[in-house]
Amino acid sequence: MSHHFPFDTVLVANRGEIALRILRTVKRLGLKGALVFHAADKGAPAIAAADIAIEIKGPSPVAAFLDAGQIVAAARAAGAGAIHPGYGFLSENAGFARAVAAAGIAFVGPEPAAIELMGDKVRARKFVADRGFPVAPSAIEDDDPASFVERARAVGAPLLIKPSAGGGGKGMRIVRDLAVLDEEILRARSEGQRYFGDGRLYVERFVENPRHIEVQVMGDAHGNVIHLHERECSVQRRFQKIVEETPSPALTPEQRKAICETAAGIAKAANYRNAGTVEFIYGGGEFYFLEMNTRLQVEHPVTEEITGLDLVEIQLRVAAGEVLPLTQDKVPSKGHAIELRIYAESPARGFVPTTGKVLALAWPEGPGIRVDSGIAAGQAVTTAFDPMLAKLIVHGTDRADAIAKARAALRDTVLLGCETNTGFLDRLLADPVFAEGEVHTGTLDARPDIAAEPALTPAEVTGVLAAAGLSLRPTRDAADRIPEIHAAMGHWRN
């Protein structure tokens, strides 16, 4: 058993880049890293990095990672005293957190009660509003189902319909014409029931072209809560983030202080423990509570880059009962960090997922460059899981320096075998709207030209076709073949 922790083995109940990232910290701390994996991830680096790897099965790869009983059994088999859920899958499942605790295993995350409170968007909004924190004008179906449509209409257009149990943009509807409100409510309810098994809804005033700003918080079991600054996540497609950065270019120092202290206040009121993120909609100098994610976020590396802290290590120490390692006034912030999510997808075709085998892979290196990846050369990229392959994180002295480093790093990235969004990301970073920090959540919808592939000149088309033709084995064999009449001459020389 480690002299720092009451457990010596941590099971990671996740996959891909986040599994590998957690395992690195676990092993650096002198603990053993166990991992559950599905056969669909054969050849993944995380499997090789784990001290113990246990295969899990299910009717689908995703179903295997949602099987709480199977994962707890794997933790017992590995002798794990703690389970880190990463993000996604069971990371915000209160039932799973309770099952882990009932098995005598530490859950590296918040208490089940906090997961339930913040996981229900309606309860969370009411909790926040009742304590005087800012929320957008809204109507909640649970308050009085019979008058819900009437109250929703009173909020006024434009408004946003959301499922109470929603996430990831599913079931959300923007209504700009109240004449279609009734049918949009029916559609949102149907989608909420289909995706989450819960058709309850709420509506809130829709802020046109808002910015999405979130605050990283951390709490311990001794009542201490701190924030670790904000992140801006406004560049999104289909309500899902693509680029994250910190600090936000939108905030003044006074606004930054207000939004971060509000996030910490919400977490403190909820007696929050471990890592979490409080998310806000920001526009016109005002911000409103959006939701709280009760887990480690995909974009946590940018916070690590400007603070120099390892958030997974803090998570593990909090789960072990330790006090937070620093107070609010000691939380550092240096420079500017940007994270780019590298997806197997085609931006020009509506960001549809792509597949293939990773034929060649080389990541950029150098000062201020970090890559969190979960793939290796030879590995198959399929539609079994989320299309995110890796995260490219850069840290610069200021925002302009970070953008320049990110563009250079993208040019040094080699990932062949399936189409990715790296070219799109470079076009986005080069666009004046992004360079000036004037993005909002609707930027990509308003600028489809950024996603579109640039047209090639006739000479470029000829060059690409020639290179492709010469790379094919039949073409190369024909070029290298010695005519039979010359081959018959053997080694004769004149």
Image: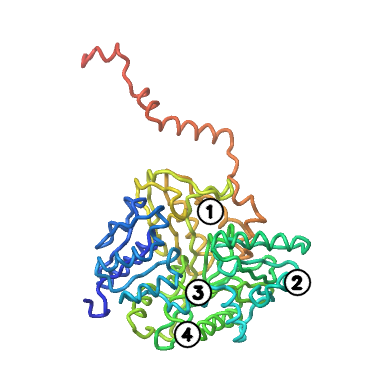
Sequence-wise first label, 4 or 2: 2
Disc 3, disc 1: CB below 8 Å?
no
For label 3, the residue is: 277
Q: Is residue 468 left or right of residue 288?
A: left
Looking at numbered disc 1 in the image, what kind of residue is underneath it? Asp
Query: Viewer-proximal residue, 446 or 270?
Result: 270
Sequence-wise first label, 1 or 2: 2
Residue 222 is marked as none
Looking at numbered disc 3 in the image, what kind of residue is underneath it? Thr
Label 3: which secondary element:
strand
For label 4, the residue is: 271
| Distance CA(mark 4)–CA(mark 1) | 42 Å
| Distance CA(mark 4)–CA(mark 2) | 35 Å
| Distance CA(mark 4)–CA(mark 3) | 14 Å
| Distance CA(mark 2)–CA(mark 3) | 33 Å
Within the image, what quadrant is residue 23 found in?
bottom left
Sequence-wise first label, 2 or 3: 2
Label 4: which secondary element:
loop
For label 2, the residue is: 150
**Rendering coords of residue 55 (x, y %):** 30, 57
Sequence-wise first label, 4 or 3: 4
Q: Is residue 134 left or right of residue 243?
A: right
For label 1, the residue is: 426
